[in-house]
Image (tube, grey):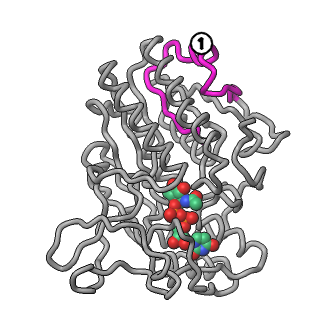
């Protein structure tokens, strides 16, 4: 199958490229090679066309004969400052809009979209006898007092977390998340108008070899791995009991190959997760032990925008794509503890003026 892969030189994109080639697909690989992600003097990897998805003319030429677009290109991270908004809007929102428009013109009807669990915002909770509850953001007074968990407003009982399903409401809480929701909405509307097919893969916390070293835009696995590499102890915020789903990048690549090969009806969002939730404290301990580094320190600090628990239900991806993660977090994180990282290229979002 002829596949146009965007973001092909990035952390996830380069793993997807390799997996597609191994699956026998013909990959047309493109990447904008943004200095913020790759450095100002990075060499373009062999076989990658240096093309920005916002360039309709370049895209039109490369899309001829393509059956599916696998769209991994994006400015990543949570958005450190409000000043980052135009970079997200331009590269992620406008980039996707241009890509979809040119696909429609050329007659390419299938898209696999890299989305994220950040579209949900906070995870889902319940009391012993309630259905899913979506609590409002945690109060600063509670966080200051070290009260990190949600409690039932009526009884004060601790709320239990539950896995989030794809039909949950979307409540983005960061600039990056706002852009991921926008990308999904553009793609969904495009599928309706064109009769096209979109699999939106909502990645949970992705980690694995050649993950970029930590920057202010990195996820926690890269941060812990990077501090261990310089002989320091991972600093675990809150009480370390916050739950996430860490999914290995090779599993994410397998999910993309499955989505490229399975035409879904219309717009279908799918959680891409390991299915084995783990606490952030346990991630730090596993990495520290496997690295032979300093024991983690639980600091009790908090970041105001953080969600408490966000854990996926991977069932729909299994049903629709036949995808089930093969790498359990304990094995994958132990491997990641000594795996090579990508050198830091920049510490910020791309310039927008
Ligand atoms: C992360 C990404 C998000 C991405 C998503 C899915 C960031 C900032 N967040 O969301 O963009 O879409 O995964 O892949 O890139 N923590 C520590 N110590 C630290 C840093 C963080 O304990 O040094 C804690 C945080 O307080 C939080 C948890 O680790 O409770 C996860 O943090 P992080 O990976 O940054 O954010 P996610 O919400 O999981």
Q: Can you say whether 272 is above or below 65 in the image?
A: below
Query: Left of 270 or right of it: where is 133?
Result: left
Q: Which residue is mark 1?
A: 61
Quadrant assignment, res 81:
bottom right
Q: Residue at x 45, y 82 (%)?
A: 142
Q: How far across and down, in percent of the image, does residue 28 sit?
A: 58, 25
Q: How far across and down, in percent of the image, does residue 298 sit?
A: 58, 86
Secondary structure of the residue carrying numbered label 1: helix
Q: How far across and down, in percent of the image, does residue 64 sit?
A: 52, 12
Q: How far across and down, in percent of the image, does residue 14 sit?
A: 61, 42
State the quadrant of the C terminus.
Answer: top right
Q: Badge 1: how crowded within 10 Å, few (<14), some, or many (20+)?
A: few
Q: Residue furthest front?
A: 141
Q: Nearer the viewer, residue 150 or 294?
A: 150
- The segment highlighted magenta reads 47-74
Quadrant assignment, res 267:
top left
Q: Can you say whether 67 is above or below 155 in the image?
A: above
Label 1 C-beta lies within 8 Å of the nearest ligand 1 atom = no
- Does residue 308 appear in this view? yes
Q: Nearer the viewer, residue 73 or 128?
A: 128
Q: Residue at x 60, y 27 (%)?
A: 53
Q: Can you say whether 219 is above or below 66 in the image?
A: below
Ligand 1 resides in the quarter of the picture at bottom right
């Amino acid at each position: 199958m002829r596949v146009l892969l965007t973001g092909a030189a990035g952390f996830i994109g380069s793993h997807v490229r390799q997996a597609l080639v191994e699956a026998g697909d013909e990959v047309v690989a493109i990447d904008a090679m943004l200095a913020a992600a790759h450095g100002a003097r990075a060499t373009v990897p062999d076989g990658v066309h240096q093309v920005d998805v916002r360039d309709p003319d370049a895209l039109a030429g490369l899309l001829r004969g393509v059956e599916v677009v696998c769209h991994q290109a994006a400015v990543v991270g949570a958005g450190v400052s409000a000043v980052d908004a135009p970079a997200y809007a331009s590269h992620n929102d406008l980039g996707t809009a241009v890509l979809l428009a040119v696909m429609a013109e050329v007659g390419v009807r299938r898209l696999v979209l890299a989305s994220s669990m950040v579209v949900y915002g906070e995870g889902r909770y319940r009391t012993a006898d309630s259905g899913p509850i979506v609590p409002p953001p945690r109060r600063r007074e509670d966080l200051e007092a070290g009260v990190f968990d949600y409690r039932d407003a009526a009884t004060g009982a601790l709320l239990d977390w539950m896995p989030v399903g794809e039909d949950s409401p979307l409540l983005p809480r960061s600039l990056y998340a706002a852009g991921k929701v926008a990308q999904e909405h553009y793609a969904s509307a495009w599928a309706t108008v064109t009769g096209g097919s979109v699999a939106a893969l909502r990645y949970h916390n992705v980690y694995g070899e050649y993950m970029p070293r930590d920057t202010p835009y990195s996820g926690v696995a890269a941060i812990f791995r990077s501090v261990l590499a310089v002989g320091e102890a991972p600093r675990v915020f809150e009480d370390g009991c916050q739950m996430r789903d860490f999914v290995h990048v090779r599993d994410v690549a397998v999910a993309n190959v499955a989505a490229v090969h399975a035409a879904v009806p219309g717009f279908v969002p799918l959680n891409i997760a390991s299915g084995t939730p783990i606490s952030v404290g346990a991630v730090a301990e596993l990495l520290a032990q496997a690295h032979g580094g300093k024991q983690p320190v639980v600091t009790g600090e908090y970041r105001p925008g953080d969600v408490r628990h966000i854990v996926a239900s991977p069932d729909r991806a299994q049903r629709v794509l036949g995808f089930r993660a093969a790498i359990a977090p304990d094995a994958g994180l132990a491997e990641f503890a000594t795996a090579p990282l990508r050198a830091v290229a920049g510490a910020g979002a791309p310039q927008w003026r």
